[in-house]
Image: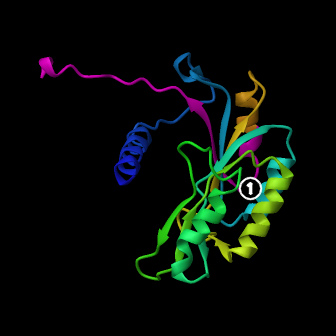
Amino acid sequence: MKTLKLILLLFSLSFISCEKEIDDQPTNEENRFVPTDVFVKIKGGYTIDKVFKFINSFDHEVENINSLKFTSSLSPDSLQYVLDYLNAKPYTNDGNVWFVNGYLHYQTNQITIFPRLFNIKNTTYQEDWLNSMKVLKLKEDTISQTAGCIIYFHVPEGEERLWESIFKKYEFVEWVQLNYYSDIILLNNKNR
């Protein structure tokens, strides 16, 4: 599991290091993005209940909300209970790769979890999440440098740039990005 996390981290960092500025006038290369996909990063002080109200104000599908971080005031020996409780929910994992994970913080010994919320446009799931926060005594990280979440929206095909500009106008939105394709160049070891 640690190896998988390390590989995913390295893969993510390789994409981040290749980031470039996008002009208002897109070139053909810049038009290479996955149709319907728009990622919206919400600032840290904007809590999950407000995020739910935000996504409910649109008629867009939400594939997931990720990059969330919560701590629990339950005793440290409850970590597995918290993970089992949350992973039993139909909206906290995809049943294959993405499950709620967590650990005990090395300094505070506090339970820290990282959920990804699937099909969360479903208001029953939203209510259940807010109730689960009470049951598990979860507190959302709203102040750290990495606080906030990323909403993975699906907008109507052909309207990706329109929605990118609409989402950017909200004061609690940190950034908006389309899901760009990226070229990968494989090196032949014989040419080295």
Amino acid type for the residue under numbered disc 1: Glu
Other residues around mark 1 within 10 Å, as few (<14) / some (14–19) / many (≥20): few
Q: Is residue 173 magenta?
A: yes
The image position of residue 36, as x and y in percent, is: 70, 28
Say which element carries label 1.
loop
Applied colour scheme: rainbow
Give above or below for 57 relative to 48: above
Task: State the residue at coordinates (36%, 54%).
Answer: 2
Residue, disc 1: 171
- Res 45 quadrant in image: bottom right
Q: What quarter of the picture does the C terminus occupy?
A: top left
Closer to the camera in the image, 175 or 106: 106
Q: In this view, does 174 lie to the left or right of 55?
A: left
Residue at 47 percent of width and 74 percent of height: 104
Q: Is residue 175 magenta?
A: yes
Residue 108 coordinates in the image, percent (x, y): 47, 83
* Residue at 73 percent of width and 65 percent of height: 47
Coordinates of residue 5 in the picture (x, y in percent): 40, 50
The image shows residue 29, relative to residue 105, as above or below, that is above
Image check: 68 left or right of 89?
left
Q: Which residues lie in the magenta part? A: 166-192
Count of numbered labels shown in the rendering: 1
The residue drawn where x is 81% and y is 52% is 54
